[in-house]
Amino acid sequence: MLELITQERINRGVQRLLQAPGDLADCIGVQCPVHSATTGTEQHRDLFAEYAEILSTVATISLQWWTETLTAHKRVSNDKSEDEILREAWLSRPAGPAAFPGIVALVRDYWLACADINADLPREQRVAPEILLLAWLLDKNYIDGVKVLSCMPYWPVGLDKEGFWV
């Protein structure tokens, strides 16, 4: 049986995604303090609850789609080892289950919603979008959501020259 996503891949993905926005934010000084899922504002916690519910459904579908993708690769590659099949699948879909349609849109929508909430708050009450979208999933043990997001090579957002997430 092909392993969908290794723990090593998840760990590397989580680390990469949690660190990456800081590189951009440092350049223009828009860092947010880190808040746990229990210390963000009520608006942040409500946004997270909505996001986590939707992501839970989409992640389940995405992981099933990835399983089907691996099965299809295996079906046409009978003479190849499971490692070769897995490698080919990742080469054809470098974001693995995060390549499922809707994942990028979901992440962008909630990232920008978090940024909108932050815009109306003093700096000390802001929650960095990567914290809300990923670290809080870890805090609340949403394993499938973490598995899927950790496969993203990068966050599908950027900063404009004024320091606003786009």
Image (spheres, rainbow, N blue to C red):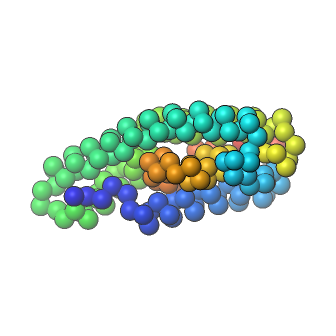
Screen quadrant of the C terminus: top right
Position of residue 145 in the picture relative to residue 19 (left or right): left
Residue plotted at (21% across, 46% down): 72
- Which residue is nearer to you in this view: 82 or 145? 145
- Which residue is nearer to you in this view: 150 or 160? 150
Residue 45, image x and y in percent? 68, 39
Residue plotted at (74% across, 55% down): 34
Q: Is residue 130 visible?
A: no
Screen quadrant of the N terminus: bottom left
Q: Residue furthest right?
A: 122
Name above or below for residue 128 compared with residue 42. Answer: below
Residue 75, image x and y in percent? 15, 49
Q: Residue furthest front?
A: 38
Residue 86, image x and y in percent? 29, 59
Q: Is residue 19 visible?
A: yes
Residue 113, image x and y in percent? 68, 34
Give residue 107's quadrant in the image: top right
Give residue 46's quadrant in the image: top right
Position of residue 42 in the picture relative to residue 133 (left or right): right
Residue plotted at (55% across, 59% down): 14
How many numbered marks, from 0 up? 0
Give residue 64's quadrant in the image: top left
